[in-house]
Image (cartoon, rainbow, N blue to C red):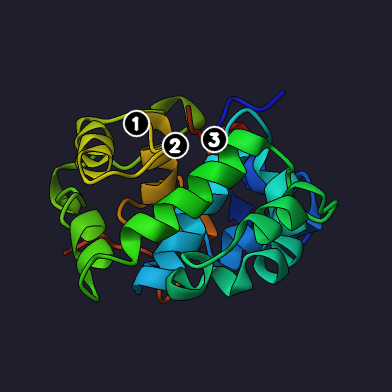
Amino acid sequence: MSDGSALAGADGALRCPWALSTPDYVAYHDEEWGRPVHGDDALFERLSLEAFQSGLSWITILRRRPGFRAAFADFRIASVAVFTDEDRARLLADPGIIRNRAKVDATLANARVLAGWAPGDLDELIWSHAPDPAVRPVPKTLADVPAVTDESTALSKALKKRGLRFVGPTTAYALMQACGLVDDHLETCVSRAAPGAARAAGHGAKGPAAGA
């Protein structure tokens, strides 16, 4: 039984344990999770998908991501902001996404709010909450990875204050993990030392399997 420390995969490389359950997770872990994400549309996509993930496993969202992108116009804020009632009905009937009425409505509402922001505002607001990596202990096991932090709570409050929905502290921290504001790859994980691995210098979450 794993003690929550990094485990060797089929290639012998040590990875965060959650990454080894499916090939989809291995690719996501190695290529995306914890790598810095910038750009309003890209961050809107991540924020929306994290909201859809609430109450589900991340693999459910990851495997439907192509369907989400097709349904939500590649998460271009300007496009989603002008979706009509017909688009909403289409989304609620689309088997390629999660047909949760509250989450669909929140995504549409968030796009309308964000369409009124200046370019770069979402990127700036989110990244302003990245903690100093020098003061964050490097996690050795999954038990060292938090589900919520002071920074994610502050980010959640800031997003809500500006009118966004489905952005609670746990969702906000999952966003921070996924988008590289924090590096929660374990100490001996191959991705922690990999070129381009996140170093937030300005994705309850113990890896996507538990809520990223």
Disc 3 marks a residue whose amino acid type is Ser
Residue 149 seen in render: yes
User: In this rendering, which labeled residue sits more in front, label 2 or label 3?
Assistant: 2
Above or below residue 204? Residue 120 is below
User: What separation in Å lies between label 2 and label 3 (alpha carbons)?
Assistant: 31 Å
Q: Residues within 10 Å of mark 1 (few under 14, many from 20)?
A: many
Q: Looking at this view, name the residue that lies furthest to the front.
A: 85
- Occupied quadrant, residue 166: top left
Residue 208 seen in render: no
Q: Say which residue label 1 marks.
A: 169
Above or below residue 76? Residue 113 is above
Disc 2 to disc 1: CB gap under 8 Å: no
Disc 1 to disc 3: CB gap under 8 Å: no
**Residue at screen point 50% across, 31% down:** 142
Disc 1 marks a residue whose amino acid type is Pro
**Residue at screen point 22% across, 46% down:** 162
Above or below residue 143? Residue 112 is below
Q: Say which residue label 3 marks.
A: 5
Count the numbered circles shown.
Answer: 3
Pick whichever, 12 or 142, lies toward us: 142
Apparent side of residue 42 relative to residue 91 in the rendered image (left or right):
left
Pick whichever, 7 or 58, lies toward us: 58
Q: Earlier in the sequence, mark 1 or mark 3?
A: 3
**On-image quarter of the N terminus:** top right
Q: Say which residue label 2 marks.
A: 166
Q: Position of residue 108 (x, y in %)?
A: 51, 53
Disc 2 marks a residue whose amino acid type is Phe
**Residue at screen point 72% across, 54% down:** 91
User: What separation in Å lies between label 2 and label 1 (alpha carbons)?
Assistant: 10 Å
